C-alpha cells in the first residue's frame, strides 16, 4: 500500500499540509484502504499481520481506523499510536497527528459513515470484521 508515498514526488506531494500527513494517508490511498478492509471481512484470512516499513504511519492509521471500527476508545487508540515513540525516539509522533483523521470520521457521522462514505465498504463487510475480531 502506498508505493506513491515513496516515489520521486514522494511525501511532500502527498502530505503538503503540515500536521495533516496521516489524513493524507487516508485520502490518497482510499482504494488501498478499501482493499485492506475488504480483506479483513474475508473469513478465511485470519490470523492476519499488517505492517509498513516503519510500522507507524500507514500501520498507525490502519490500526486507528480498525480500532475505531471495533469500538475502542479514542484515548486508547492514540496511546497505541504513540507506542512507536518508544522505538523511534528521533522522530516522535504526536497525539494531534490523528486529530484530522478523527475529524473526518466525525464529519461522516462516526466510523460507520466514514467506512461507507470515505472508504467504500458495505455494512455487511463491517459486520463481518466485527464478528471475526470481537468476542462477547
Image (cartoon, rainbow, N blue to C red):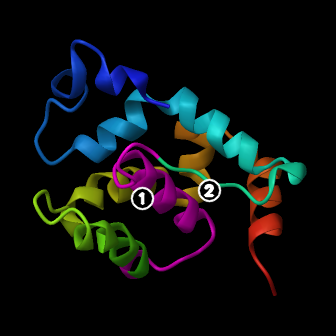
Question: Residue at coordinates 50% horizontally, 49% vertically from top-left?
Answer: 51
Label 1: which secondary element: helix
Q: In the visual, does 13 lie left or right of 50?
A: left
Against 121, is 70 above or below?
Answer: below
Quadrant, the C terminus: bottom right
The residues tagged by marks 2 and 1 sit, at their Cα atoms, a distance apart of 10 Å
Judge the density around disc 1: few (<14), some (14-19), many (≥20) Cα neighbours within 10 Å. Answer: some
Q: Residue furthest bottom?
A: 136
To which quarter of the image does residue 37 belong?
top right
Can residue 64 be found in the magenta stretch? Answer: yes
From this viewpoint, is residue 29 visible?
Answer: yes
Q: Which residue is mark 1?
A: 106
Relative image position of residue 10 (x, y in whole percent): 23, 21
Can residue 82 be found in the magenta stretch? Answer: no
- Give the magenta part as a residue range: 52-75
Q: In the visual, does 105 lie left or right of 117?
A: left
Question: Residue at coordinates 26% horizontally, 67% vertically from top-left?
Answer: 87
Question: Residue at coordinates 21% horizontally, 62% vertically from top-left?
Answer: 88
Q: Which residue is mark 2?
A: 112
Label 2: which secondary element: helix
Q: In the visual, does 94 lie left or right of 115?
A: left
Amino acid at each position: 500500500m502506498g508505493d506513491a508515498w515513496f516515489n520521486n514526488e514522494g511525501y511532500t506531494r502527498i502530505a503538503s499540509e503540515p500536521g495533516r500527513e496521516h489524513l493524507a494517508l487516508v485520502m490518497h490511498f482510499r482504494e488501498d484502504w478499501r482493499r485492506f478492509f475488504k480483506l479483513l471481512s474475508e473469513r478465511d484470512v485470519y490470523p492476519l499481520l499488517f505492517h509498513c516499513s516503519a510500522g507507524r504511519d500507514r500501520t498507525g492509521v490502519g490500526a486507528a481506523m480498525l480500532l475505531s471500527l471495533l469500538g475502542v476508545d479514542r484515548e486508547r487508540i492514540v496511546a497505541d499510536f504513540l507506542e512507536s515513540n518508544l522505538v523511534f525516539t528521533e522522530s516522535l509522533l504526536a497525539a494531534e497527528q490523528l486529530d484530522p483523521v478523527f475529524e473526518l470520521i466525525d464529519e461522516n457521522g462516526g466510523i460507520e459513515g466514514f467506512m461507507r462514505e470515505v472508504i467504500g465498504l458495505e455494512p455487511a463487510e463491517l459486520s463481518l470484521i466485527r464478528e471475526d475480531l470481537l468476542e462477547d
